[in-house]
Image: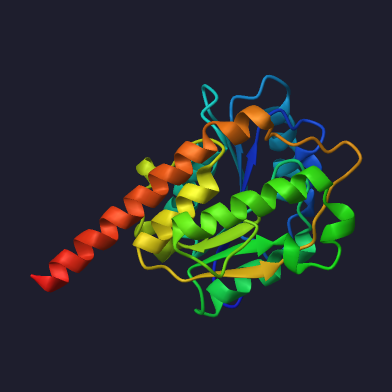
Amino acid sequence: MYQQSRVAVVIPAFNEQAAVGVAIAAVPGFVDRVIVVDDASTDTTAAVADAAGRTRGETDVITHAHNRGVGAAIVSGYRRALALGCDVIAVMAGDGQMDPIDLPRVIAPIADGTADYVKGNRFLHPEVWRAMPPARIVGNVVLSAATRLTSGYRHVFDSQCGYTAISAAALAALDLDQLFPRYGYPNDLLSRLHVAGQRVVDVPVRPVYGPAWKSGINLGTAIHPIPWVLLRSWSTRLASEARARWTRAS
């Protein structure tokens, strides 16, 4: 419980047997429910998560029958959190690359009613230029600039940061079935939140890159499907805004 809000943390994981147990154990004690979504891993991720969950308590492990993508894994976690009656649902990665100390900062704007969706922004943290790999900085800057245009949220940055929190009310305003299921999910989500009129804020989070860190995003991922997702999100938002103007005019 945090400020009278029931809190869940969704942990999407794919082949994270070496890190997911540590990630679960690191979730702060005020979190009411941890929901691990194993996206059809080919290693022992599910078993490790189950063992760590039994130690921590109040942990669910959901396993997809086939790999559906990180966006779909997060949505599965969202659905479970809503079914459990949680008010604030955060997302932390299964690779342990998110600092649990930052979690109160991420969920606070939702708990106090000043935001509907909160996303971490590593570029607001002083360690970013030292900790984030140079190639990742360039990629994030380019995608963040593009997402500012397509989403309609000109004040947000670091669009690819997965350290987020959302209110149950904001989730109820979205069609979860329509969210893009793979890489590109956060860009698509921001656009749909804008269409739904949700308040989005950035908060500083510490960039964490361990010696064994390896990005799941490569050149092929950057070329496809993210540009297509951005284009789709932009066109969907513009069409929705045009319909709203037409409705007001009529």
Identified at 35% across, 62% down, the residue is 196
Nearer-the-camera pick, 132 or 70: 132
Image coordinates of residue 142 in percent, x first then y, are 64, 50
- How is the rendered protein coloured? rainbow
Identified at 59% across, 24% down, the residue is 40
* 169 sits to left or right of 70: left
Identified at 73% across, 55% down, the residue is 27
Instruction: Locate the N terminus and report the quarter of the image it occupies.
Output: bottom right
Identified at 72% across, 21% down, the residue is 43
Q: Quadrant of residue 101?
A: bottom right
Q: Is residue 175 visible?
A: no
* 189 sits to left or right of 160: left
Image coordinates of residue 186 in percent, x first then y, are 54, 49
Q: Is residue 136 visible?
A: yes
As drawn, which residue projects farthest toward the left? 250
Using the image, determine if residue 203 lies above or below residue 183: below
| Count of number-bearing discs | 0
* 122 sits to left or right of 67: right
Image coordinates of residue 203 in percent, x first then y, are 66, 70
Nearer-the-camera pick, 55 or 224: 224
Instruction: Locate the C terminus and report the quarter of the image it occupies.
Output: bottom left
As drawn, which residue projects farthest toward the top? 42
Image coordinates of residue 58 in percent, x first then y, are 63, 51
Using the image, determine if residue 112 lies above or below residue 107: below
* 136 sits to left or right of 143: right
Nearer-the-camera pick, 224 or 83: 224
